[in-house]
Image (tube, rainbow, N blue to C red):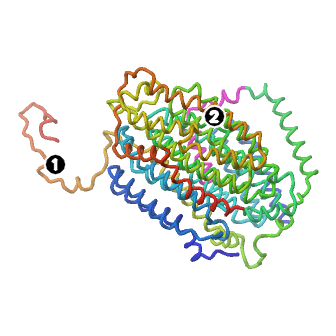
Amino acid sequence: MVQALVFWLLASVVVASAVMVIVARNPVHSVLWLILAFFNAAGLMISMGAEFLGMILVIVYVGAVAVLFLFVVMMLDIDFEKLRGGFVRNLPLALLVGLVIAAELVLVATAWQMGPLAPAALAAPVAAAPSLTNTQAIGTILYTDYLYAFQAAGLILLVAMIGAIVLTHRTRAGVKRQSVRAQQDRTPESAVSLARPPVGAGVDTEEGVR
Amino acid sequence: MTTDIAASLVIGAPEIMLAAGALFLLLLGTFRGDRALGGLTVGAVILFGLTALTLVDDPPGRQLAWNGLYVADSFSTYLKLLILVGASVSALLALPHLARLQSARFEYPVLLVLATLGMFMLVSANNFIALYVGLELLALASYVLASFHRDNAKSSEAGLKYFVLGALASGLILFGISYVYGFAGAVGFEEVAAALRAGQSTGVLVGLVFILAGLAFKVSAVPFHMWTPDVYEGAPTPVAAFFAAAPKVAAVGLLVRVAIDAFGGMVGQWQQIIVFMSIASMLLGAVGAIGQANLKRLLAYSSINNIGFLLIGLAAATPAGVSAMLFYLAVYMVMTLGAFLVLLAMTDADGRPLERMEDMAGLVQTRPWIATAMAVFMFSLAGIPPLFGFMPKLAIFNAAVDAGLYGLAIAGVLATVIAAFYYLRVVKTMFLDPPASAVVVPQGRFNLAMMVAAAVLVSPLGLLLIGPLTEAGRRAASALF
């Protein structure tokens, strides 16, 4: 009973916030609605016992992807009103395409049959062990059987980091950086200059200061 | 089956070595800065040499490691040695060029080592997941290398174009893999092959088509070749030389392994696709090159054309066909690297690269040695005896005729004749046209030495190598069948 209640609550919030992503006028609000949708989808996964996937969804999508979206929306100068301009005019076509896709999905789901080649594939790759949470189960496969792919994925991320630095990092002239060494090497002689201006005259800054 | 880490470390020693070496070079580079470029390049070549030492001891049979994701056999060893040669030459030939164009950053050899690691993982992949991670490792490093001259608009464009289309191809491959996994119930090559022996379904066929399309993009076979001329033209010339040599070897090797190992039970299905891609690549590569005025674009079309010839061997789907391909790959790599070395030597007095066809006019009068070397490479690429380039073509056509693919062999011969036109046009421009206004001042002595070595290898003197090369190719091909 509670399960069903939780499901309907989370699911309806997901759908509602997904709709709000599209109809919100302010793109920043769209991203915020998207984050709400992600959170509720994560809740759905957790309520179904896939706590690892749910947490990953929050970390990856809310933590990284949504924040990236926010950056893009705020920093790029895109006229969203213009993008949305032809909405009403294109609505009939969009509805038609949507209907066709929905009909196709229903047809595929009803007509689908298991292919002749997937006999053993349905068996779970890890023997069901009630004491194992699914985080542990994924971990035991990922760090043993797929260690090779896991390490290779690490190297791919390293290449991505090197690439980002190679392609974007440049040393610009005139950037002021803190140099601890230079700060410590300062002596009163090099840092302080005394001037005795005559009465009524100012101090020429160029004279004493480096 | 669980991973026996100790045994896997021994079998996968070449990859471990490259990965550790890349990290070490990266660390060295971050401490020493860009002035370490020369030292790191030499370090990378030494690393490649040490890796080759772990490879030469080639035990017979298949050795599986990392829970069956990785396989080491004679096939992978042969290709890995070729890749090491290609990568070493690409690392060395870049040195004078990078310094000249103010792009001398220490990441170049590091990225090259990581790309090589990706290629190693590709040719040793025994599982679609291992295939995909290897492919991505190679591809990401390649995108960065293509836009290495980031201040040059063309180089950035090449990198972006390569990235967008490469990501699309990766998506196609992943989509295909998901189909194969869904319908065959496995991602390991052996398990897929076993499932196909039990019965075939349309779903696996769909997956096969998508995987082949994605891999065709990686080897730049028609109709997935569009990126090649633009990327070769825009990328820095040393990088283009690298793209034309080592990754091509790896991608072709991977294509062969996937087709024979995983989908060996569906030869009838993929053979049609390969035959089509082969004919289309040969013809389009030959015809498309005719109108090109830029030498890098010309060499790009030449590589498309050569991929077509290579695919003939795969279409035959026989040990003879695959061993002819392996032979072809070795010779093709030397010829292409040689042609790119000539292109790199073509610089004017200010060190700017000369890449246009008219810059080569009358080269024989000003720089007779460079012109002669280029003529050797062009004649060899055209497949004119007694140069070395003729022998692998002959072996490939032989394999096709033995497999009963007469139409394909005839198309190949026709394409050779068409392709000979533009190769010979380069020779004609160098030897018969009046000298161009631009003066060629070659730079980098070591590059010239490598150019001469490549020219000697493809000259009739290189024919002495036929014996060992065919023997190695035959041994490598027998590992697959």
Based on the picture, tell me whether residue A63 belongs to the magenta stretch: yes
Depth order, front residue of B78/B202? B78
- In this picture, is A96 found above or below A188? above
Residues marked 1 and 2, same chain: no
Between circles 1 and 2, the one closer to the viewer is: 2
Q: Quadrant of residue A90?
A: top right
Q: Closer to the camera, A59 or B326?
A: B326
Q: Amino acid at mark 2?
A: Gly
Q: Position of residue B342 (x, y in %)?
A: 43, 38
Work out whether residue A45 can be spotted: yes
Q: Is residue B338 magenta?
A: no
Kind of element beneath mark 1: helix
Give coordinates of residue A197: x percent, y percent. 8, 36
Output the chain of dot 2. Answer: B
Label 2 secondary element: helix
Which residue does the numbered mark 1 point to in the structure image?
A191
Q: Which mark is residue A81?
A: none
Q: Is residue B85 left or right of residue A96?
A: left
User: How much space separates mark 1 and mark 2, taking CA atoms?
Assistant: 70 Å
Residue numbers of the magenta segment: A61-85
* Labelled disc at residue B285: 2
